[in-house]
Amino acid sequence: MGRNRRPPRLRIIRGKYYLADVYLPNGKRTTIGFGTTDSRTQGEIMVAFEKWLELFGQQPQKVLSFDNPYVAIQEIVNPSRLITVKELLQKYRVHASKTIAKVDSNKKHPDYTFIDRIEKFLKPYMDWPAKDFGPDELLDVQRAMIEHRYYIAEREKRYTRRGINDNINWIRKIWKWAMGRCMVTAEQVQGFEEVKPLRIGTSVAPDNVKRKRVTEEEIEKVINCLGSVVGDMLRLIWYTGMRPNEVCSMRPYDIIHDDKDCWLYIPGRDHGPVGKHKTMRFERMKVIPLAKESQEVLKKRIKDFNSRDYIFSPKDTVADLIAQKAKERKTPLSCGNRAGTNRKEHPMIKPRDCYDHHTLRRACQRACKKAGVELFVPYDLRRTMATRTRATLGKEATKVLLGHAKTSTTEIYLLEEVQEAVKVAKLLAANG
């Protein structure tokens, strides 16, 4: 049987710090700070403590869930207080920090980019009660995004139609989250549906150019202008249709090579029961088959299948570059520096352990310019692979190969109408 605890008492430290020692429901003791006489009068502190003590006696768990006793009094005594748009965004950001998964690099998760962008466009409404922000205001935000201009490397940029629709959907998502916590009304969230997404041709918002199909001749020209490491990475994407970040994070340990005719690559095999990949949230394992042509690319780079080092590393690129320079050396070896004698023991800039998809994209685009080929990015190779597979094996086979959860996602990569028209034309010609 637990002992009867003394009720919390307010004590003063050094004549101005007001504290209260409180016993938690689990028996442990903690200290609650009520501020100093520099920020509040002694009378205000005493009144706040008496009110807090009353609430603590009624619902201690809820009172102690707040970090600040003044916030606890405000939220519990007046729960219907109007929450401003600024406060709503702050609360959602706290929620996001607990629920959004951390990324491996030091960069922010892409979801935070949307939240930051939304805050920028909601600045005129920050002091508004969140319940007063309706479809008319959301429409004004949509128009502001259409008219917005920003600059990257002195080039004027605009938000795309699809990007604007994504931002508006994020505002709907935040208000829907607030509705579940009784901060806004269901009618208000329903009213947001009156703001329709932008359609093609209905506004001046630009559309991204659809990913083009890359020919075999073009990919060979580009690979010839690249080093062996990056060139092999593009070849693997061309053969398998895997995502650029999947080829960047490839390790020997992730490859099951029991079947000599077809190896299996499971990204992040040791990360969890379904590996580590873009669609892992659907609890689906991603398996990328590696046929003979892909195996030929990998065999020369894999020495130990139990290794967890990255197969494609910038360190190898630097080593290849140094070896190439040594091979093209014109100064006799008896003169000048010998190979390796003029390198710093601890250089400030060191090559990383693995590539990322941004580095791969930039290298690909530089090689396109050098080869005189129309610019493309590694993701275009994935779409080209999808189009080839669809033409020979059908849509369902393409869905399985690309690792999509829905066939509708696969259709983004395919020239569906064109391929169906070609199929019909061939059938008519065969029957004619």
Image (cartoon, rainbow, N blue to C red):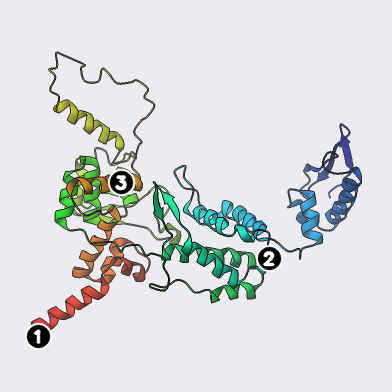
Q: Closer to the camera: disc 3 or disc 1? A: 3
- Badge 3, how many Cα within 10 Å: few under 14, some, many 20+? few
In the picture, the disc for residue 407 is none
Q: Is residue 331 left or right of residue 309?
A: left
For label 1, the residue is 431
Q: Residue at x 41, y 68 (%)?
A: 204
Give, as a three-letter code, the residue at label 1.
Asn
Distance from the alpha carbon under mark 2 to that under mark 1: 66 Å
Image quarter for residue 238? bottom left
The percent coordinates of residue 377 (x first, y second) are 28, 53
In the picture, the quarter occupied by the C terminus is: bottom left
Q: Mark 2 or mark 1: which comes first in sequence?
A: 2
Q: Nearer the viewer, residue 305 or 13?
A: 13
Q: Mark 2 or mark 3: which comes first in sequence?
A: 2
State if disc 1 and disc 3 touch (CB < 8 Å).
no
Q: Nearer the viewer, residue 96 or 62?
A: 96
User: Outermost residue, top direction?
Assistant: 334
Q: Circle 1 sits in a helix, a strand or a loop, which is it? A: helix
In the picture, the disc for residue 183 is 2
The percent coordinates of residue 284 (x first, y second) are 40, 61
Distance from the alpha carbon under mark 3 to that under mark 1: 49 Å
State if disc 1 and disc 2 touch (CB < 8 Å).
no
In the picture, the disc for residue 362 is 3
Give, as a three-letter code, the residue at label 2.
Met
Image quarter for residue 356? top left
Give, as a three-letter code, the residue at label 3.
Arg
Q: Is residue 232 left or right of residue 48?
A: left
Q: Closer to the camera: disc 2 or disc 3? A: 3
State if disc 3 and disc 2 touch (CB < 8 Å).
no
